[in-house]
Image: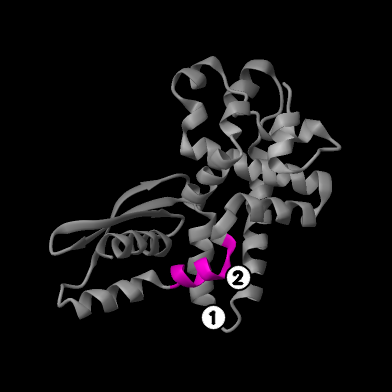
Amino acid sequence: MELSELEQSLNYHFKQPELLLTALTHPSYAGEHQVVHYQRLEFLGDAVLQLTVSRHLFFELPGVPEGQLTRLRASLVREESLNLAAQRFNLGKYIRLSHGEERTGGREKPSILADIMEAVIAAVYLDGGLEAAEALVKRALGDRMNPEFDQDELDAKTKLQELLQSKAMSSPQYTVVDEQGMPHERVFTVELHVNGRILGRGRGRSKKAAQQQAALEALKSLS
C-alpha cells in the first residue's frame, strides 16, 4: 500500500512505516491475513488524545472548574469529532478491510473511522514522540481546539436552561435512548425534549457528555 499521500495529508513522515500500516489494519483484515490489527494502537492513541486535549484545556482555559473541563474534553474526544478528523485526512481510503467489511460500508462507518484516527495518533506518538502526536491531534481537531470554540462549548446545558427561561418555555428533559459498547467503554445516546418536541440529540462516553452535546444541538436549533 502506497502511504506517501497519506503521510503528506498528516504532515508527518514515518521512520517506521509499519506502524502506520498497522494503524490502518482492521481486525477483519488481520484475521484473514494473519497480521497485526490496530486495536492495541487504538488503546494507546486514546490515552495520547486525552492527554493532549487535557493539557490544551488546562492551559488555554485558566480558572475554569474541573467539571466543566471534563465535559468539554468529552465533547472534543467523542466519536463524532474523531470521525470528522478521520474524514479530514481521508483515512477511509487507506483502511485495510476484509471483503465482508468492505461490502457493508466499513470505510464510511463512524465507529471504525474514529478507532483508526486514535490508532494513527498512537502510531505517530510511537514513531515521533509526544510533540509530534500533539501536533497531529491539533491538526485533526482543527478549529475545535481554539479557545474561542472552547468557550462556546462550555456548559451548554446551563446556557440552554437560561435561554428557555427567557422564552418562558418548559425545562428540557433528557432521555437516554441507546447504550452501546462494553461496560468499561459505554457510548450513550441522549435525546433532549422540550414541550414534547425533540430539539437535540447527542452521543458521548458518559450520560453527561451526551446531554451536553444534545444541549448544543438544541441551542443551535433555537438560535
Q: Secondary structure at mark 2?
A: helix
Q: Which mark is residue 64?
A: 1
Horizontal arrangement in the rendering, residue 217 relative to residue 62 (left or right)? left
Do residues under tags 2 and 1 come within 8 Å of each other at their CB atoms? yes
Q: Residues within 10 Å of mark 2 (few under 14, many from 20)?
A: many
Horizontal arrangement in the rendering, residue 16 relative to residue 4 (left or right)? right
Horizontal arrangement in the rendering, residue 110 relative to residue 143 (left or right)? left
Q: Amino acid at mark 2?
A: Leu
Q: Secondary structure at mark 1?
A: loop
Q: Which residues lie in the magenta part?
A: 145-154
User: Could you give the CA–CA distance between mark 2 and mark 1, rounded to whole angstroms?
Assistant: 9 Å
Q: Residue furthest right?
A: 15
Q: Which mark is residue 57?
A: 2
Classify 109 as above or below 69.
Answer: above
Classify 121 as above or below 15.
Answer: below
Classify 84 as above or below 4.
Answer: below
